[in-house]
Structures are given as structure tokens and as C-alpha cells.
Image: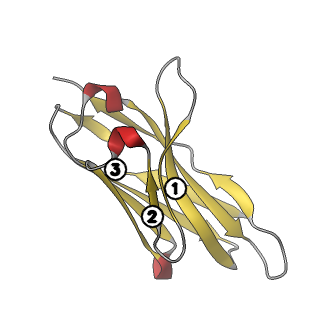
Amino acid sequence: QVQLVESGGGLVQPGGSLRLSCAASGSIFSVNDMGWYRQAPGKQRELVASITSGGSTNYADSVKGRFTISRDNAKNTVFLQMNSLKPEDTAVYYCNGKIVPRRFMPAMNYWGKGTLVTVTS
């Protein structure tokens, strides 16, 4: 069984920074793409940033230049450094991983339970 566990959310003032972490554990053969999504109250879940196993990244236009995604392949961990936070960044942030649980199995989509980020003065 694969688990993704996020940490690092919290309350921060506008202009502040937070760093989210997500560690994948359990029965893992390999980890492909990993990413962060967010869902604000009353809105659909949206992609924030993603990163391939080779390190190629993709960002939502709303966070480009402010957020940085990175990963530690040896530890099956993905990070999201969030700078210059704005009130509109307030949301539950979810970690996502495309993970192959066993050899010869296809990659499956796994989600963490989410961590709340609140940006307010």
C-alpha cells in the first residue's frame, strides 16, 4: 500500500513564505511524476506545479516566479517552496504521485490527504 503524507501547511501573512513537503512510502517500485494541487473553498482542484522524475517542471501561471517545486528521488519526497504568498493562495494543498507499486505494474495515481495553507493578515 502506498501513502503520501504532506506537511508544512499553516497560517502566514501576505508576502510570507511556506515550504510544503510530501513523502511517499509503502510498497513502491518507482515514482514517476509528482505534483501539488490545491483546492480553495467553492472551487475545483487545480494543478499548482508538477515535476518529472528527471526534474522537468511545470507551473500554473498564477504561481510562476513565486513557487518552486523540487524533489528528492532517493527519499521519494517532493517539496513546494512558496514565496510572496497572496490571500488567493489560500487553499488545501494536495500532493499527487504517479507511482508504480510493483515491478511490471502500471503507474497508479495516489493522493495525500492535504494540508491547509491560509494566507491572511
- Report which residue position mark 2 lands on: 78
- Residue at 53%, 17% (x, y): give it: 42
C-alpha separation, residue under disc 2 versus residue under disc 1: 8 Å
Q: Secondary structure at mark 2?
A: strand
Circles 2 and 1: CB distance less than 8 Å? Answer: yes
Position of 88 compared to 100: left or right? left
Q: Nearer the viewer, mark 2 or mark 3?
A: 2
Q: Amino acid at mark 1?
A: Gly
Q: Give neighbour class at mark 2: few <14, some 14-19, many 20+ (Cα, 10 Å).
A: many
Relative to residue 43, is residue 15 depicted above or below?
below
Look at mark 3 in the image and give the residue it sits on: 8
Q: Is 53 placed above or below 23 here?
A: below
Asked if 59 appears above or below 71 in the picture, the reply is above
> Which amino acid type is shown beneath numbered disc 2?
Val
Residue where numbered disc 1 is placed: 35
How far apart marks 1 and 3 lie (CA) works out to 15 Å
What residue appears at the point 54 percent right and 74 percent down from the top-left corner?
53
Q: Are marks 2 and 3 in contact (CB under 8 Å)?
A: no
Q: Is residue 73 left or right of residue 102?
A: left
2 or 1: tag closer to the N-terminus: 1
